[in-house]
């Protein structure tokens, strides 16, 4: 049996258990508080199944989760029912998202920005973020680096076998086009020796920090800082993930 990406949402969290979401949340909230954002409205772009959205809501933020996958949204809404947290979920594309008003901050993790394959589209997302941020609000997002795609992921095959599930990850990186492609096949035990197969193909783009800064400025925002992930140190040549902070520009502060 084989199912497409839409059904993959149901097993997404199973294979993301290597991500220490609470630690990521601590790092993210630390940055938010550094910029004076201790409460209020925050939007998360590419919220997926709502793992980070839930944690930020539990920290006292009024969360809006945005994702374009109906199945991811369904899992996120199930978590919301379970936790009882007050989270608004919107099924929208990052390139066209609309909010009812402005928010204090926008966040995006798990390399969602790398899924934007064209530089002009990245600029458009930043422009929308700038539009929906409060005056002086901040956008905090992470990205996989060129180094990670080229040196770590490269043209490799990764496999993991567990008792009730396994996956095969075939990765290819086109350095000239800066596009990373990975085919992911997941096998999950359903009954006895019967396994269901899920398959999907992901495309991500590697951006240099200079390209990201350029898109931020073109969108009318202000570049504030870039860090080697989970530190306050500048990105290194061998950084695999970076965090970028941009500030709203153009609105009058009251």
Image (spheres, rainbow, N blue to C red):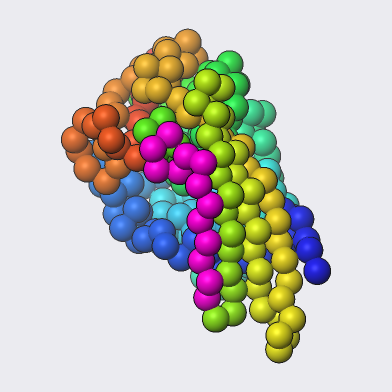
Can residue 187 be seen by looking at this rendering?
yes
Left/right of residue 153 with respect to residue 226 in the rendered view: right
Q: Residue at x 41, y 54 (%)?
A: 56
What residue do we see at 57% from left, 54% from top?
A: 169
Residue 182 coordinates in the image, percent (x, y): 59, 44
Q: Position of residue 214 (x, y in %)?
A: 42, 13
Q: Residue furthest bottom?
A: 192
Dividing the picture into quarters, in which one does residue 181 lie? top right
* Magenta-drawn segment: 150-162
Res 202 → quadrant: top right
Q: Is residue 224 magenta?
A: no
Query: How many numbered marks, from 0 up?
Result: 0
The N terminus - image quarter: bottom right
Q: Is residue 43 visible?
A: no
Q: Residue furthest right?
A: 1
Residue 74 lies, with reference to residue 238, above or below; the image says: below
Q: Quadrant of the C terminus?
A: top left
* Along the viewing direction, whichever of 121 and 41 lies nearer the viewer: 121
| Residue 77 place in picture, x, y as percent | 63, 61
Viewer-side residue, 235 vs 40: 235
Q: Residue at x 43, y 34 (%)?
A: 150
- Image side of residue 57 versus residue 183, left or right: left
The part of the image, by quadrant, that contains residue 76 is: bottom right
Q: Position of residue 40 (x, y in %)?
A: 41, 44
Using the image, determine if residue 250 lies above or below residue 35.
above
């Amino acid at each position: 049996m084989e199912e497409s990406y839409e059904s993959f949402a149901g097993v997404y969290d199973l294979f993301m258990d290597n991500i220490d979401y609470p630690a990521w949340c601590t790092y993210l909230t630390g940055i938010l508080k550094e910029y004076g954002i201790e409460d209020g409205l925050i939007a998360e772009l590419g919220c997926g199944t709502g793992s980070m959205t839930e944690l930020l809501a539990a920290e006292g933020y009024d969360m809006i989760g945005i994702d374009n996958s109906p199945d991811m949204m369904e899992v996120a809404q199930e978590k919301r029912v379970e936790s009882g947290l007050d989270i608004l979920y919107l099924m929208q594309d990052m390139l066209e998202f609309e909010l009812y008003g402005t928010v204090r901050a926008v966040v995006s993790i798990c390399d969602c920005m790398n899924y934007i394959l064209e530089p002009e589209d990245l600029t458009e997302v930043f422009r929308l973020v700038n539009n929906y941020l409060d005056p002086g609000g901040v956008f905090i997002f992470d990205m996989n680096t060129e180094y990670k795609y080229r040196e770590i992921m490269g043209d490799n095959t990764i496999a993991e076998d567990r008792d009730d599930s396994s996956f095969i990850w075939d990765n290819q990186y086109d350095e000239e086009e800066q596009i990373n492609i990975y085919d992911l096949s997941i096998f999950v035990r359903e009954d006895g020796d019967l396994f269901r197969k899920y398959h999907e193909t992901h495309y991500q783009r590697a951006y240099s920090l200079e390209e990201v800064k350029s898109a931020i400025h073109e969108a009318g925002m202000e570049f504030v800082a870039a860090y080697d992930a989970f530190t306050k140190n500048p990105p290194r040549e061998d950084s695999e993930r970076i965090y970028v902070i941009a500030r709203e520009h153009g609105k009058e502060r009251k």
